[in-house]
Amino acid sequence: MARISNLNLKMQFNAAPELKYLMALITALSLLWGFTLSWFYFQLEMHFDISMVGVWLGLLLLTLITTIFLAFSQADIRQKQIQQHKDLLGFILLSWTLIINAGLLYETGGTINPLIHFLLLPIALGMLILTTHWFLALAGIAGLLYTLLTHYYVPLLSLKVTSLQAFFAWYLQGSMLVFLGLVLLLAILIFPLKSRLEAQKSALNQQQQLALQNETLLSVGSLASASVHQLSTPLNTLFLLKDLLKNEVHSDVGKAQLKTLSEQIEVCIHVLQTLRERADQANHQTHLEFSATKLLTELKHEFALMHPKSQLMIRNTLTIDPKINIDTSFKIAIMNLLDNAARLSPNAVQISLEQIDSNLCFRILDEGGGLPETRLNTLGQQQLQQHYHGIGMGVFLSRMIIERFGGNLSFQNIHQNNKDGLMAMITLPISSTAGNPKDL
């Protein structure tokens, strides 16, 4: 329960980044004012009115507490109100922070106090989180406060400065502290902003990459549809000719060869029909919750049709039947990998399925000798110019399809049964779990 509560707090807190920046600003200002004023009072003996300065510092801490309360609020209604009026809320908090800074400056020498530069910090944050008209209003308030401080302030003489040397020490050391404080505070504000911009840039790059991948898939799908249309006519012609050839072939060898020809033509027709159906489904694809064990069963049947002389060995360690959010294109991706494995080692193709945490893990293993280690990490990242064992466009498309569903495809050389081979590992998030796995 504590872990869930902390997660909710984090979600609510991240929902209002403007409040996060305000908290950082007010916290830093509180520390900077407290430290420098203590330095002025005890080290440089600037005897300002402690009670009034304490009141202004108390108001600054109260503002910080209010900001923290708003940032970590658990009320959904309050969070929605904050999001709807975040510009107004930011303007009010920044303006109030300016007024408190002006009050502290009034008590400690006015514009001659090196801490006068602290008035720039709320303006810098306002430039980041406020819209243009609210920022201009904030800048106007800052200008008005600065003008008032040039005329109204507690004079230095009333602070009981012991000597001119003490005054210069106060100003120079105060300027040094202000400079270091500004650098620290700007770092506190800029680095989170930089991280946020980098995260947005990374998300944008991922979206662009996904869009390019989808465009590539659509192009390949269009090419496949056109190829199906072009191949249908010659295959139909061959299908008709084989019936005519039955009356012309009389030898046993010729009949056996004609039978083999008929079987191959039927395989080609079945593959083209499947390709046409998948192309139609891809044009209207929707993500559905699909049973993992049912998918494994369908893969077994399709593999038997495509490779009748090979046998697909299946190892399923699941105790429940998970659901995965996919469409039919995901099955195409796995069939591409199974087809590569069958061509490399037709008598030793295995697919295993297991659950690791909240992911399903498909492993496709063969005994085809593996690949050079230098190619494993980049396999499937782009179409290979040199096709190792015929692996090229199919793996490239499989990787793009798998990543569309939040999955990942990786490869590893293995050694089993005293033979070298390749393992393709697919991880995919689970939607939900229900039922028991069916026997395959």
Image (tube, rainbow, N blue to C red):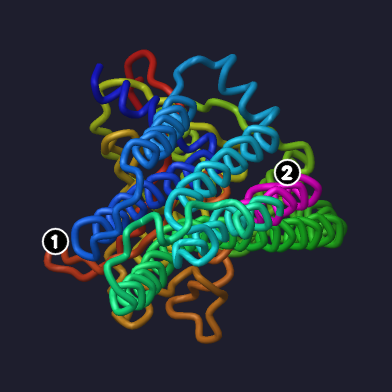
Which comes before the other along the chain, label 1 or label 2? 2
| Residue 318 belongs to the span the image colors magenta | no
Horizontal and vertical percent for residue 108? 42, 54
Q: Name the residue: 24% across, 60% down.
A: 45
Q: Which mark is residue 101?
A: none
Using the rendered view, name the quadrant where residue 201 is placed: bottom right
Q: Is residue 356 above or below residue 349?
A: above
What are the residue bounds of the magenta stretch? 126-143
Q: Nearer the viewer, residue 314 or 45?
A: 45
Residue that numbered label 1 is attached to: 417
Q: Name the residue: 65% across, 34% down.
A: 86
Residue at the outermost left position: 418
Q: Amino acid at mark 2?
A: Ala
Residue that numbered label 2 is attached to: 282
Indicate left or right for 285 with 63 as reference.
right
Q: How many marks?
A: 2
